[in-house]
Image (cartoon, rainbow, N blue to C red):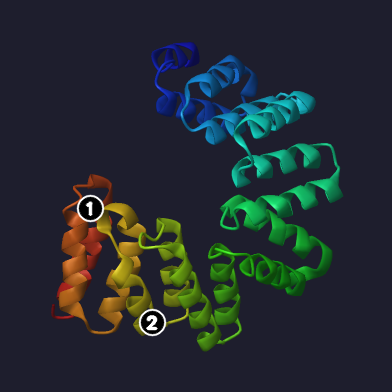
Amino acid sequence: MLPGMLSARWDNPDELYRVIVGTLQDGLPADVADAAEHLYGIYPNHSRAVCAWANVLMGMKEIDKAEQVLNSHIKQDGEDGYVVTNLAKVHAARNENDQAEAILWHALELDPNQNIAVGWFAALANERGGKNAMVEAWKRVAALPGSWHAQLWLARTALESHNAPGALTYYRESLARVGETVPADFLQQMSGDLGIHGRFTELVELTEPYFIPELHGLQVGNNLIKANIELGHLQRARQILNQLRMQSRPDWRPHLDHWDTEIQRKGG
């Protein structure tokens, strides 16, 4: 099936990228090697394409070629945090751990909000010194200009330590930096962590102003509906429920029906 899928999507870079990534996840990098090289020539998002190509090469154990491809891209298009993170992966694959970590840090200097890079940097610190070292790693990233992702992890740590004021400070700092449209994973983590710790008032206060049903979907909507029910704001809970129903997602229906029942049970 794969050759036919590749052929049908050969000139559609977005679709071709998805097939390549899916095949990589299935552990079959050699099957999409030619497609990955072709993608780099046609995909307007060069950074994404070169990382897909490099990961295919690394999956095939062609580490030197992956490094060459990434460095050639950097020389031509300039440094990009995502690309430099993948260059760090090349050195990690060779067990050049000090060099990999130095390059990873540089990638974070370029873009401190890369989910994979932040997680990797914190994991390395945790391996060396445990949770305290991991927290210090997040603080180091959080100090970089424009950082907002590390603050979410620092906020989670503060909540786990029963330091709600500290967590709220981190959340507000993050929201001030992230821009007008807040990514879905940001709101999902923030609202989820506040909900787990029973901070429903703060959940609603910080999440609702940025909630866009089309963008943030069921995961964030679930958290908002639950918080509003817990606070007795049944009318607002139903408004959010109706906004989610308007997205016409059959796969969401069981969850939304559950909330409909809960709101009615509470008298709303």
Left or right: 15 as drawn, with respect to 78: left
Q: Residue at x 51, y 30 (%)?
A: 22
Q: Is 223 rendered above or below residue 57?
A: below
Residue 168, x across and y down, in percent: 48, 81
Of pointers 2 and 1, the one earlier in the residue sequence: 2
Q: Nearer the viewer, residue 64 or 216?
A: 64
The reply to whether callout 2 and callout 1 are in contact (CB within 8 Å) is: no
Q: Nearer the viewer, residue 158 or 225?
A: 158
The C terminus lies in quadrant: bottom left
Left or right: 111 as drawn, with respect to 7: right
Query: For the residue marked with disc 1, what is the amino acid?
Result: Arg
Q: How many marks?
A: 2
Q: Residue at x 69, y 72 (%)?
A: 135
Q: Is 9 rendered above or below residue 157?
A: above
Q: Nearer the viewer, residue 210 or 132?
A: 210
Q: Is 63 rendered above or below residue 265?
A: above
Q: Is residue 265 visible?
A: no
Disc 1 packing (10 Å; few <14; some 14–19; many ≥20): few
Residue 142 - label: none
Asked which secondary structure carries label 2, the reply is: helix
Residue 14, x across and y down, in percent: 42, 29
Query: For the residue marked with disc 2, what is the amino acid?
Result: Glu
Which residue, given by chain and number where applicable, does mark 2 sit on?
Answer: 202
Mark 2 or 1: the one toward you: 2
Which residue, given by chain and number where applicable, does mark 1 sit on?
Answer: 253
Q: Is 174 rendered above or below residue 230?
A: above
Q: Residue at x 45, y 23 (%)?
A: 16
- Distance, label 2 to label 1, CA atoms, is 27 Å
Residue 130, x across and y down, in percent: 78, 69
Disc 2 packing (10 Å; few <14; some 14–19; many ≥20): some
Residue 96, x across and y down, in percent: 86, 43
Q: Is residue 167 visible?
A: yes
